Image (cartoon, helix red, strand yellow):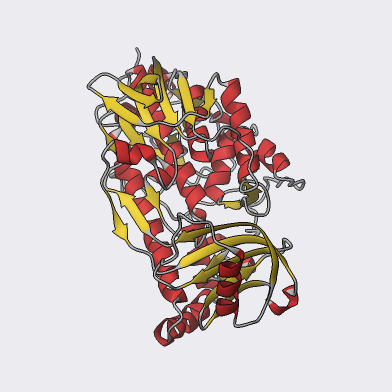
């Protein structure tokens, strides 16, 4: 009997396993693929961008530098000044200029060792997470295909062949075609596709016929990356291609010629896959003792590269809440806040990708909107707006407080002795930063000593606050004023998120 069985050993499942292992839970991960390595996980096909908030999550668990090293990034960022974004990505294939991001307009921004986004690949992410999971005692079993799930009020059992795996909780992190989602009876609703997309690694006889970068055309879109032979393309066929079949050389060449308007020749196709902009989401992320995270809970097109970041956010939000529930100190309703907080974020990402698909349609109306959008995102305000959305810096959970920092991802506050918030979060506990000179809240915080790390002292920039209470996922749970932090309010907030005090 494990505390938690996780189905799926991708980045989301492994990140969640690390969070649970860090909190002292016994965790078993079941993965149907027999081997972790795949050409789809390595560059260029496995290339992914981690947003600022995802990079912050790795930083707060001490995994950012291992990830940068595994990703081939040598110029680690400093932490004295807020770093300008290195890249802002695109909206509907229209690239944004990172130099136009108004850094001063981003909310509650402080210097941090976490980068403003990291270019990496799935292989590097999974390698770092696998190593950490193993060090935390997490067991990963490969070549296991779950075929049935049964649950009652006490346990949930995953059946795989002749084997049964029992746990107190089960989390499906098994991707967009999630078996767990179907077996557990989750409702999955949304919109049907407008296009079929293709990711291709091929030998191209005449690559000069294709423009580099994103190219929107009267018949679709294609992307030629810096990696030799790496092509992406979209054809607005209503998602008509049969995705149960592997796209053939002739089909891929015909699509590329149609969407590029050229007679380009693919001399050989090494790897190819298809996808659509079908956008679906479960109505809840929990059914009894079964929960979902990542693509198992929501699918959408890869436009904007939000999928991995959305899944890591799910895992970070769920991990500490599920661990508190396992250990029996979670306040009433804590686990239900997972759906309440993350479902709106997933819904927003689905709409963000739908908007991009609508703008990219090869018709006069969409092309007219493209012109308007291109003008808007060419401005400083427009670029900053898009960056705020895609980086996660504009995300704010509704925690019922009018204090503007509450519900946001905490900035990397630093005490004058050099201690950073990120340093204090590596063990997965919450953090209470007390900037008062008399350690006013020390006695109160000691009631939650095993769940909240208390640190006190003046800060280089306390944002005009006296105390900040940060949840294990890095979200600000409560903030008190500088002149007279309210002890009773702090204790109410601590009890609301961390349960009754131990003493």
Q: Is residue 387 above or below residue 485?
A: below
Looking at this rendering, what residue extends furthest in the right direction?
A: 74
Q: Residue 481, percent across and down?
A: 40, 41
Residue at horizontal 33 percent and vertical 22 percent from the top = 157
Closer to us: 479 or 497: 497
Q: Is residue 208 above or below residue 303?
A: below
Q: Quadrant of residue 500?
A: top left
Q: Is residue 146 above or below residue 3?
A: below
Looking at this rendering, what residue extends furthest in the left direction?
A: 153
Q: Quadrant of residue 285?
A: top left
Closer to us: 499 or 348: 348
Residue at horizontal 48 percent and vertical 28 percent from the top = 144
Looking at this rendering, what residue extends furthest in the top direction?
A: 503
Closer to us: 204 or 469: 204
Residue 491 horizontal side relative to residue 163, left or right:
left
Q: Residue 292, percent across and down?
A: 36, 38
Q: Residue 193, percent across and down?
A: 38, 65
Residue 31 horizontal side relative to residue 324, left or right:
right
Residue 300 horizontal side relative to residue 64, left or right:
left
Which quadrant does the C terminus fall into? top left
Closer to us: 263 or 503: 263
Q: Is residue 453 visible?
A: no
Q: Residue 314, percent across and down?
A: 42, 41
Residue at horizontal 42 percent and vertical 52 percent from the top = 395
């Amino acid at each position: 009997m494990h505390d938690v069985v996780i189905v799926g050993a991708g980045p989301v499942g492994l990140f969640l396993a690390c969070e649970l292992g860090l909190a002292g839970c016994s965790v078993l991960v079941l993965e149907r693929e027999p081997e972790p390595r795949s050409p789809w996980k390595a560059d260029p096909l496995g290339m992914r961008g981690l947003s600022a908030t995802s990079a912050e999550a790795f930083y707060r668990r001490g995994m950012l530098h291992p990830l940068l090293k595994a990703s081939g990034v040598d110029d680690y960022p400093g932490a004295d000044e807020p770093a300008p974004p290195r890249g802002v990505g695109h909206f509907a294939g229209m690239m944004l200029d990172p130099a136009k991001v108004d850094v001063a307009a981003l909310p509650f921004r402080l210097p941090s060792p976490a980068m403003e986004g990291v270019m990496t690949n799935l292989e590097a992410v999974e390698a770092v997470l696998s190593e950490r999971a193993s060090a935390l005692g997490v067991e990963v079993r490969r070549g296991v295909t779950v075929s049935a799930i049964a649950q009652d009020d006490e346990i949930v059992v995953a059946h795989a062949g002749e084997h049964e795996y029992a746990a107190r909780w089960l989390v499906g992190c098994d991707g967009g075609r999630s078996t767990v989602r179907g077996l557990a009876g989750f409702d999955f609703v949304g919109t049907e596709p407008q296009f079929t997309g293709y990711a291709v690694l091929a030998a191209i006889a005449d690559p000069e016929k294709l423009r580099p970068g994103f190219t929107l055309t009267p018949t679709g879109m294609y992307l030629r990356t810096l990696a030799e032979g790496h092509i992406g393309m979209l054809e607005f066929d209503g998602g008509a291609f049969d995705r149960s079949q592997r796209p053939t050389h002739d089909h891929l060449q015909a699509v590329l010629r149609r969407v590029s308007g050229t007679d380009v020749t693919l001399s050989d196709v090494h790897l190819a896959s298809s996808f659509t902009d079908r956008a679906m989401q479960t109505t809840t992320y929990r059914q009894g003792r079964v929960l979902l995270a990542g693509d198992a809970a929501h699918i959408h097109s890869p436009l904007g590269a939000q999928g991995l970041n959305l899944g890591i956010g799910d895992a970070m939000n769920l991990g500490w809440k599920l661990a508190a529930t396992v250990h029996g100190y979670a306040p009433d309703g804590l686990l239900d806040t997972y759906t309440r907080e993350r479902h709106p974020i997933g819904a927003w990402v689905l709409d963000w990708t739908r908007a991009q698909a609508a703008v990219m349609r090869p018709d006069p109306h969409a092309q007219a909107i493209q012109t308007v959008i291109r003008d808007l995102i060419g401005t400083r305000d427009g670029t900053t707006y898009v960056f705020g959305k895609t980086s996660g810096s504009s995300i704010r959970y509704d925690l019922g407080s009018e204090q503007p920092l509450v519900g946001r991802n905490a900035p990397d506050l630093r005490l004058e002795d050099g201690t950073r918030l990120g340093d204090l979060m590596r063990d997965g506990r919450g953090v209470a930063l007390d900037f008062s000179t008399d350690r006013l809240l020390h006695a109160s915080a000691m009631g939650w000593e095993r769940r909240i790390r208390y640190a006190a002292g003046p800060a280089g920039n306390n944002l005009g606050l006296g105390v900040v209470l940060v949840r294990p996922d890095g979200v600000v749970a409560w903030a008190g004023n500088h002149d007279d932090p309210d002890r009773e309010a702090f204790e109410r907030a601590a009890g609301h998120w961390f349960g009754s005090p131990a003493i």
